[in-house]
Amino acid sequence: MEAVKGQIRYISQPIKIGNTQWRLVIKERAAHRNLEEDRKRLCTEYQWNDEGRWQPGTNWPTYNINDTYLGMPRRLGKLYEREKEIIELLINGKPIAQMNLFE
């Protein structure tokens, strides 16, 4: 797969895990080399703040593609759960459920 810097569509509010701020970003990426030119897909990416600079999760010191959590903090699952509805809306087109008015 080609690494393409895509347009950012959404940036979550950061959360603090340990001493580090983390956020979830939804942005465009090339989906596959064999797709037509300019065809992009949306994907999620975790980013962490290093001295005022946001870094991709792949730059995290313990990043490990062979680990279930990619070597990143397991508590990132809380961030994903918090942002799950917006992820479903932007990536899969699934509408956000409306709250029951009578609850």
Image: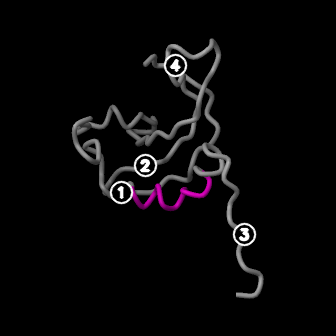
- What colouring style does the render use? one colour
List the residue tagged with mark 1. 17
Q: Tell me how far mark 4 sits from mark 3, CA to CA.
A: 35 Å
Please give left or right for residue 59 compared with residue 54 in the image: left
Residue 83 is situated, as x and y percent measured from the top left of the image, at 55, 56
Q: Amino acid at mark 3?
A: Gln
CB atoms at circles 4 and 3 under 8 Å apart?
no
Q: Amino acid at mark 1?
A: Ile
Disc on res. 98: 3
Q: Earlier in the sequence, mark 1 or mark 3?
A: 1
- Which residue is drawn at the image coordinates 46% and 36% (left, top)? 54
- Which residue is drawn at the image coordinates 52% and 19% (left, top)? 4
Q: Amino acid at mark 4?
A: Val
Q: Amino acid at mark 2?
A: Trp
Tag nearer the camera, 1 or 4: 4
Please give left or right for residue 103 compared with residue 70 in the image: right
List the residue tagged with mark 4. 4
Q: Which stretch is magenta? A: 77-86
Q: Tell me how far mark 1 sits from mark 3, CA to CA.
A: 30 Å
